Image (spheres, helix red, strand yellow):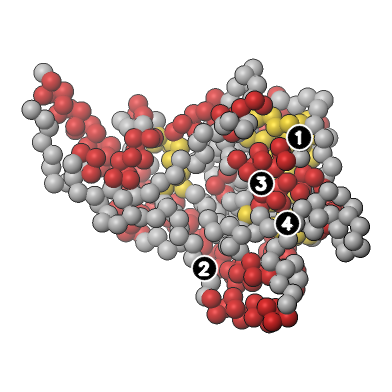
Amino acid sequence: MTPQITADAPAIHGGRPLFSSPVRFIKPTLPLLKRVLRSYRPVYHSGLITNAALVSRLEESAAEVLGTTHCVAVSSCTSGLALTLKALGLRGEVILPSFTFFATGHAVLWNNLTPVFADCDPATWTLDAASVKARITERTCAILAVHLYGNPCNVEALADVASQHGLKLIFDAAHAFGSMHNRRPVGQFGDAEVFSLSPTKLLVAGEGGLVSTDDAVLARRLRAARNYGDLGAYDPELLGLNARMSEFNAALALAGLPMTDLKITRHNEIARLYTSGLADLPGLGFQRVLPNDVSTYKDYSVLVDAAGFGLSRDRLAEALLAENIVTKKYFSPPLHSQTLFRPFYRGDHPVPNTDLAAGTVLSLPIYESLPDETVEKISYAIRRLATSRSELSKATAGVSR
């Protein structure tokens, strides 16, 4: 005999999927095309379509929003990170989290720097300052931290460590345009912060990035670095790349800039809906955002303890996909377990919080056009899986006897 399947059973137990078509993981809200073309059309007809007037306007507007002196537009967050490390003239080891997207590590390797992986905080999942401090050697030159999912790092703790040891402090702020730390905009901290404007972010340029800094020398070097190292004299000052932002990308970002605050508000509303719908379930954990901080919630993620919840993270992801709910395992595997970075991992410096997070964190759909009803239905799907798992286990145990 097999346990009887009810009409309300989850799809993995033979029921009908909750959604008839897939719920997308991400769906960017773009500005009206006519707004983008209104600013881009004159530029297009002028023939100056790269690194020109609209790029300058975006830099000025972003610097005003972020409250920084300088903002340098680049082709991507990855190129921005790589060029920032290059422009700072770093040599030696860079301490960074392993629980991050691999582009963070790529920027280090592209500069022939040695990545040293530190652990994440078990509550916020951002870079842990104590773990950083334990890994500092005479070869350490910088700390590269990440505002994970838009959740700001413990900036003061990292800044204290950097100051005590004379290290540069750079933030990968790919997810964090619009985040706030201690009521100050992310973008004002460290030697530089680097943002992504790719389609998965809240401010979208199609492709592109921004580097914010109050260091005039660094900003000047970055403007050269994004243009092959040349500031216009046909005489490169440093080794650079073609990392210029096009005028169309700038036009798209400029049109989307006024929408950012509303997007962040909506992402936070969705995050609260998820949390209120799931908080009482055993075996689920949530990323902690510090009281005076604002996360963009570029991603909303839960930590799934298999023993408490009844399903592993991977099995939950499969079960939700059966309901036509798309999720992501951000970020699994972590850098220190990936082929490219594994040779740099030192076993005598374990990262247990990272291993736990990478094996148990699941990111749920979140975007500003996602209806409340869909969020509630996704939460219901997770709750039903927890309940049905328990009921199915009891029924199976009864049959086996």
Q: Residue at x 65, y 21 (%)?
A: 346
Residue 7 drawn at (x, y percent) = 13, 46
Residue 354 drawn at (x, y percent) = 55, 30
Point out the frontmost of discs 4 and 3. 4
Q: Are marks 3 and 1 in contact (CB under 8 Å)?
A: no
Q: Residues within 10 Å of mark 4 (few under 14, many from 20)?
A: many
Check disc 4 and give the amino acid type.
Ala
State how far apart marks 2 and 3 are (Cα). Answer: 24 Å
Front-most of 381 and 102?
102
Number of labelled discs? 4
State how far apart marks 1 and 4 are (Cα). Answer: 20 Å
Q: Residue at x 38, y 35 (%)?
A: 314
Provide the residue designation for mark 3.
172
Q: Is residue 367 visible?
A: yes
Provide the residue designation for mark 4.
243
Q: Is residue 23 left or right of residue 62?
A: left
Provide the residue designation for mark 1.
113
Q: In the rendered view, would you say 153 is above or below 359?
A: below
